[in-house]
Amino acid sequence: MATEDLSIPKSFLDAVDRFANPRAQIYRTASGWESISAAEMLRRVAGFARALAELGIGSGDRVGVLAPNCPEWHIADFAIQGLGAVTVPVYFRESSERLTYILKDSGARIVFTSGEDQARRIAESRAQLPALEHMICVAPPADLRGDILRYEALIATAGDADIAQFRKRVAEVNASQLATIIYTSGTTGEPKGVMLSHANLSSNARGFSRDFEMMPSDLALSLLPLAHVYERTMDYGYIFRGVSVAYVEHMETVAQALLEVRPTIMAAVPRFYEKTYANIIETGHKAPGLKRKVFDWALHVAAKAMPWRAYGKRVSIGVKLRWHIANRLVYSKVRAGVGGRMRTFSSGGAPLAPELAEFFWSVGLPVYQGYGLTETSPVATFNSPKANKVGTVGRPIQDVQVRIAEDGEILVRGPCVMQGYYNKPAETREVLTPDGWFSTGDIGRLDEDGYLIITDRKKELLKTAGGKFVAPAPIENMLKTSPYISNAMVVGDGRKFVSVLIVPEFGAVEAKARQAGRELSTPAQMMSDPWVRDLLSREIERLTSSMAQYEKPKRFAVLDQDFTYTNGQVTYTLKLKRRVIEEHYRDTIARLYADVEEPRPQPMA
């Protein structure tokens, strides 16, 4: 049977029957990591599907899922889709306003939730959700009143009869049916519900998992929000190949989970790799005496070995010998810091700076970049062990076509492209042609070997007063390779030159300052300290030296806090909400342009 003919729950059943994984789902408890077998997972899915059916859920009905990454997320998802119903995921830290909008716009009849905070927020929003009939909760708060059904009770008595009935229901689900409505987080504007079919998701999940040669012996870490299509499709691929999935409920515990679970494969966004790199550099620079010298030497060797390790080019025997020594002394410890068994990292959601990718390849941590959007389920192109070129986002996946429009916009057509935006036909026509070409809104080019290179978001290109177009992301990515810069956002649309907002890597800057005999204990001190401003100025000059003059930031402002989801300045996949940030720092940005006659980067308070 072709990939596009398989529904998501049918693929799940095939995996359970074929692999019978004794540790299909792994999750952390107060007493340590515990697991659920594939057989038990199926029992719970079947029991939950029966409960939903008894509540009147059938083909086409929408069911909301509001929960962190946990075993119950997938159990609910497979149960919903096994009835031919539609999963409407909501990010578990979503604002109450957007939460209400998504559930109301989708017409969700039932919402499944896990976590006390999530349960309370649903309860508080129920009066605004006329279509919502029932709320199902994992371990609901004891003091929460109202019509709340306990998940544990619904699945408690599930048995062979429920499994047999679930198999019959799954057989009736057509791959062309709507499987999910995913509301884009959106860097601007009202969220849109992306309609994806079973075939959309299956074509992606099976395609990448095959090319990465995933095996039942693998263990994957699920850390990005399952409400987002990237982690969700990756996890489908894991499950369909019999790979164990370990769930991380909160990003703050990822470092601990890496050491405890020791995964072999995982997907992340560029921000994860940026922070990991910064932590590696900071740890190495804190080492005393000889250890610090060995670390610095190993970094130098990694740079020399990069053409060989990242691109497969020839280097001297001496470089290879030094690499093997550095590997035993330093790189092996770097790999141990992410569990010591990692064989495949995937990166998506935004462009990853080539320099960062080269670093990870050089120390024995392969990072394969891909590209896509929610509207493409998500993968349109990707690198894999079979075909990889560092610095690109890979070639189009099987049966997917990619072409570049006259204005540089990337267009995609194939089985991964969405059905359209829910209840928004006009918006659908704006991006989807009658013959199936989807306009991504991203700018890029195909190289001589057919690999795609992303330049920037079409709507995020800055145009200076002199008429020069500037792509901010490559500049920001380059700056974030500095061990002293945690985050950056380029500004300057309509201005004489571009500038940049800088978030220092506070720990690294503090350590560097201490070496120089300066005590800086707070971010506020760093914002105004001349020594810090001079350090960052030199870093900006160093990292942008090869760029065109109009791309180089002429001024910068130092911020005392990062851009976060909590402060509303990034999406839950950590993309910058540029308009929100520009409005928040409007006065700071205005001061950057108070005097335009400045020949080199100068800090502004």
Image (cartoon, rainbow, N blue to C red):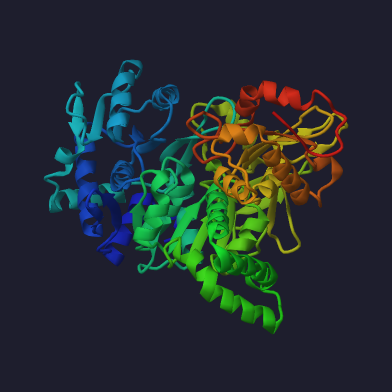
Q: Quadrant of the N terminus?
A: bottom left
Q: Residue furthest front?
A: 517
Residue 11 higher or lower than 480, as above or below: below
Residue nearer the viewer, 191 or 164: 191
Q: Residue furthest left?
A: 157
**Residue 189 in view in this figure:** yes
Task: Examine the image and state in which quarter residue 585 appears.
Answer: top right
Q: Position of residue 525 (x, y in %)?
A: 60, 33
Residue 446 higher or lower than 75, as above or below: below
332 with respect to 471 (left or right) = left
Residue 76 higher or lower than 20, as above or below: above
The number of callouts visible is 0
Task: Examine the image and state in which quarter residue 12 appears.
Answer: bottom left
Q: Position of residue 457 (x, y in %)?
A: 68, 39
560 with respect to 306 (left or right) = left
Q: Quadrant of the C terminus?
A: top right
477 with respect to 58 (left or right) = right
Q: Residue furthest top?
A: 127
Residue in view at x 66 percent, y 52 percent: 402
**Residue 392 in view in this figure:** no
Q: Position of residue 434 (x, y in %)?
A: 63, 38
Residue nearer the viewer, 88 or 518: 518
Q: Position of residue 257 (x, y in %)?
A: 37, 54
Residue in view at x 28 percent, y 51 percent: 28
